[in-house]
Structure formats: C-alpha cells, structure tokens
Image (spheres, rainbow, N blue to C red):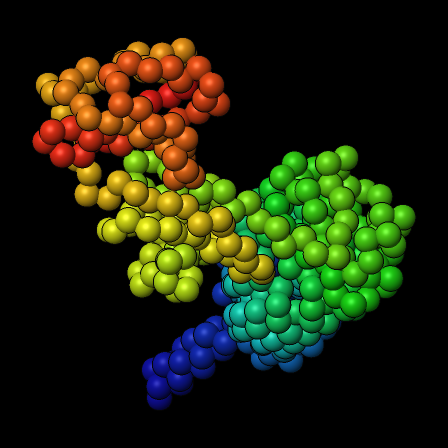
Amino acid sequence: MKKIILFTGLLLGGAALAQNVNIPDANFKAYLVGNTSINTNADSEIQVSEAQAFTGYIFCNGLGISDLTGIEAFVNLDSLACESNSIATLDVSQNTGLKYLRCGANQLTALDVSSNTSLTFLQCSVNQISSLDVSANTALVFLNCWSNNISSLDLSQNTALEDINCSGNDLTTLDLSVHGQLTSIQCRDNQLSSLYVSNGNNTNVTFFWADQNPNLTCIEVDDAAYSTANWTLIDAGTSFDEDCCYLNTNVLVNGITLSAELNTMAYQWIDCDNGNQPIAGATSQSYTPTTNGNYACIVDNLICSDTSECIAVTTVGIKEIESKLISVYPNPANDRLNIEGDILSAELYDLSGKLVQSEQTNSFSVENLKRGMYLIKIETPDGLRRAQFIKQ
C-alpha cells in the first residue's frame, strides 16, 4: 500500500512540475517570479495557468536578458517591453492579443509580427533586422524601426499610421501616399531616391525629417509651396513637387545590347515600330534585339513608371570585325580614325543609333565628334562588319 501511495505521489508531483513554464534565462525568470501580478501564488515558479491568466504588461527592459523563452505561454499578454537587453531571437507568435511591443536595442536579425494582428504600437529600433513585414498589422498607429538594415518597407496596408520613424536603414523607396492620418514622418539617413507623401492631408504632418538621403532630389507632396515653407529638414539638393514621377530613363548601348541605366524594380522593353507593344519575356534590365528596329524601355519603381526614348538598332546580324582582315586604330581616337583592310564604306553611329558620319575612305577625321563611344558599320566586299571606338 505504501508503494502505491508513494508512486501516486510521484505522479502527482510530476504532473504539477509539468505545468510550470520553461524559462531558461535566470534574469527573465527572476523578473517574472518577482512580479506578484504574474506569480499570484508566490512560489518559485511560473505556472502555465498563471501565464495564461495574465492580461497585463511585462516590462523587463535592461535586465541583462538574453533569452525570452517562456513568453509564448502568456497567450493573453497585452503589452511587452524588453528593450536594452541582448536578445537574439523573439517569438511572439503565440501572443496573438499583443497590442504594444517594444524590443529595441537588442540583437535581433529578424522579427515576425504576422500573428499579432491587434498590434497598434511597434518599436524595434537599434537592432540588425533586414526585413520587416507589417502587412498583417493593419491597426498599427506607431512604427519605429530606426537603425536597422531594412532595404524595403511596404506600408500599404497600414493606413492607420500616425507616426513613422524608419531612419537609419537602407531604404531606396518609401510610399506614404495612403497615410492621411500621419502627423510625424522621420526617414532620414537612408538611400532614398523616391519618397511619396502626397496623401491629401499633408497639413496634418507637424514633424517631417528626411535629410541625409543623397539620392533624393524630389519629394512628392500635396502642395509644394506649403511643404517648402513648413518642412525644412531636407537636404540642400532636395525639393518638393506635386509630381515626382520622372525617373531616369537613359538607355545605354553596347553593340546591339540595350541596357536601362536605372537600377530599379521592374522593366519592360517595347517595340516602337509595332505600336509600342511589349516584347514577350523582355523584362530584364538589358535586352538584345533579334531584328533591327527601334526599341524603348519602361522602367518602374512600383510606385510610378516612365518610358525611355526609342533607340535605333541597325546592326543585328552584322559580324564583328575579324582582326586578321580589318582593324580600327587608334582606339581611342582624337583627330583621325584609320580602318585597315579592304572597305567600301563606313558609317558612324552614336549610342542612340543616330547616323553621325559617312565615309568612303580608310582614313578620315573624327575631330568634330563629341567625346564618347561610337559604333562603326563597315561595308566590305565580303559583307558588313561592325566595330566600336572611343572618341577622346
């Protein structure tokens, strides 16, 4: 009988032990155990039932915590502040009722808040986060992700935002055009080349800070005069406009290969001789035509798009110069250009495909040409050849 009682006691003790929350970090556990609102039975553990019943605020900033394991047991937690620790990972996927999260000044490289659909306040600054998805956080009012490594930030679903601080990241584009509730915007110290703030309610914005963006020349706003007068924290080379959709559409030519100079999000090459029809599959930054014609590129940064001038390609199918038969020298050239070999004519084209000079001799002046690269189409008894030279 004693053995049976002892065995039963062991089972009951094991069952009780199994109900304790696993909290491996001693500093985090000490905080939780010392919080009488959480540790309601005043023992040395946090029971699962205690964690589940807690609906308040965990405030454990600056306590030397490196591991927040155990936070997942607090399924009804309203608010969490764990700033200024050394936390490398943070799992809040079970804290689905979380409304307030401060986890700045840690060692986070990633943060998943996709389960926290009730979140209204998020502060994750001074970490090493490279990607932040807040598309599920449609109730978000305050977002501070300052000083991370974020290169893109889609806020299109966060129309309730009133305060945004994304300074000190690697953003190239920021679109705040659907955020009519905004009162404070901080996006300084990025790599922005596109910033759209035309939301119909710019007069609501009482603080605007967008300097230290060396590639930003134009900020699209509701009223350029109003923003110029009231938003002064911008770079000297930056101005406000009601329409900033004028992308760099320059196209570079290398032989018959065309390349859009702007490094952006999307490209579509079109056939200018066929009603500007899109060319199937030609959606890369470079395009090599298979037939002679005129071609252009639509460049798109996913906010606005623009189209380049049509570029003439006239040498598809023409063989490169064979060095044993024909050579072009000097290259680069300054005053004169010589073509060695048996030629009938030579035509010089600039990089836009425009014919700039025609010759019937092997040696001719290029003194009047502007500096740059040129394409030579050479007619020989054996057919057409092409080459390039640089005018100094």
Is residue 151 or residue 11 the one in the foreground?
A: 151
- Residue 86 percent coordinates (x, y): 58, 46
Q: Residue at x 69, y 64 (%)?
A: 177
Identify which residue, 50 or 252, lies in the foreground: 252
Question: Which percent across, then down, holds residue 138?
Answer: 64, 74
Q: Is residue 109 visible?
A: no
- Quarter occupied by the N terminus: bottom left
When asked about the image quadrant of residue 118, the answer is bottom right
Looking at the rendered structure, the number of numbered marks drawn on it comes to 0
Which residue is located at x 63 percent, y 54 percent? Answer: 245
Let me know if residue 80 appears in the view: yes
Q: Residue at x 62, y 39 (%)?
A: 215
Q: Position of 107 compared to 239: left or right? A: left
Report the residue that reaches farthest toward the bottom. Answer: 1
Horizontally, is 321 left or right of 37 in the view?
left
Q: Locate residue 37: give its quadrant.
A: bottom right
Q: Relative to 86, does residue 160 appear above or below in the rendering?
A: below
x and y, in percent, of residue 271 in the image:
37, 58
Tell me residue 230's x, y (percent): 89, 50
> Eyeballing the image, is 83 above or below 370?
below
Residue 10, above or below 274: below
Most foreground residue, 28 or 115: 115
Front residue of 196 and 49: 196
| 40 lies above or below 146 | below
Which quadrant, please, contains the C terminus? top left
**346 horizontally vs 43: left or right:** left
